[in-house]
Image: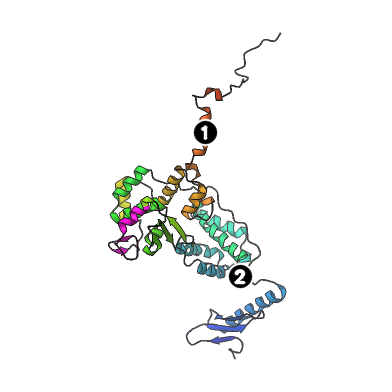
Amino acid sequence: MARENGIYRRPDSRFWWIAATLPNGKRIRQSAGTETYEEAKALLAKLTLDAYKAEHFGIKPQRTWQEAVVRYLSIKAKLRSFKDLQRMCRVLDPFLYDLTLNQITGDVVWQIVQSEMKKGNSAATINRYLALMRGLLRIARDEWQWIDSIPKIRLLSGEVERDRWLTQDEADRLIAACPAHLAALVRFALATGCRAREITGLEWDRVDLRRKTAWLNQTKNGTPRGVPLNADAIEVLTEELGKHSRYCFTFRGKPIVFQVTNTAWVTALKKAGIEDFRFHDLRHTWASWHRQAGTSCDELKDLGGWKSRQMVDRYAKFATENLRSAAARIEREKPDNVVELVTFLSRPDVKRA
């Protein structure tokens, strides 16, 4: 009887299952996620009604935030930052778990912001949550076409941008203070701007020393990219040849699977006299050095694998070559360049007749 209604039991599951053809012709077979027959029957009725409305009236079914998160995480599963995305989704879950995407309004976003501010979270932390919400909703609208509109989500102002980088002297002190395996990672990061996981996961079959190129297959944004190797990077890789058949960088003959910011990193920083510095700041150092050397923002964007110019503009302040001639126009050695203007205070007193 239940099978004829599209609802049935499976011997390997405690839940009721649904197998039916919807009014739009779509065949579904899925778990109802409930042990109660009435609830499974209600779910099938809802799916049937939504499909009927979509087929005959063009009304889109109401999708929930939870449905969107499940699909979103399945798409992002291979990203290095996947665990961070999971963590942020868990933070947002108490606010959004029982809402449909159409019910997420500006008021809901405001409640999230106020709640996180009361917890003492910084603008930067809250902005990470807002950016995830905005990105997920845009995908649901533009790619999945689950909704027609989304609320306008603005990031909070006042976020303090981290501006931490090393001078050449500080970098030399840090390298000298590191054990051999860590020094190799630091040197390669400073030469290429690669992230820690990109370096520790680099394999020899993705390196061509003759052509001075490496290819990264797993990056933060999920897009493979090529990395040109300068003389410093080639020197580091040459020193690592023969230590492992697969991985370029190792520790005691084995691939580096641990976090590089461990006790050895902290000890090296202390020995070098460097404070408030993370391994990722080596990438900021590399980018800052490039801009100081005259590398354009467009060149730096391609070198670092950034998807948008906005991510690179933060380093524009380090390049002043294009302003040198302007700054020199008022040098004291060039008095003829400055025209003295007569002001009311400098004007001589003239007696009226």
Q: Is mark 1 on a helix, strand or loop?
A: helix
Where residue 79 sits in the image (x, y, percent)? 47, 64
Label 1 or label 2, whichever comes before in sequence order: 2
Give the answer, above or below, for where 15 lies relative to 95.
below
Q: Which of 171 and 301 is in front in this view?
A: 301
Horizontal arrangement in the rendering, residue 39 relative to residue 203 (left or right): right
Give the answer, above or below, for where 279 lies relative to 90.
above
Give the answer, above or below, for where 278 lies relative to 76.
above
Residue 322 part of the magenta segment: no
Residue in the image at 71% along x and 76% along y: 56
Instruction: Measure how far apart labels 1 and 2 are at the Cα level.
Output: 59 Å
Where residue 308 sits in the image (x, y, percent)? 54, 54
Residue 247 part of the magenta segment: yes
Image quarter where the C terminus lies is top right
Horizontal arrangement in the rendering, residue 13 relative to residue 185 (left or right): right
The amino acid marked with disc number 2 is Arg
Q: Is mark 2 on a helix, strand or loop?
A: loop
The amino acid marked with disc number 1 is Ser
In the rendered image, which residue does mark 1 sit on?
Answer: 325
Residue in the image at 54% along x and 51% along y: 309
Where residue 241 sits in the image (x, y, percent)? 31, 60
Where residue 276 sits in the image (x, y, percent)? 38, 48
What kind of colouring is applied to the model shown? rainbow
Whether residue 67 can be seen here: yes
Q: Residues within 10 Å of mark 2 (few under 14, many from 20)?
A: some
Whether residue 278 can be seen here: no
In the rendered image, which residue does mark 2 sit on?
Answer: 63
Q: Which quarter of the figure has residue 182?
A: bottom left
Query: What segment carries the magenta color?
Result: 233-258
Residue in the image at 70% along x and 10% along y: 352
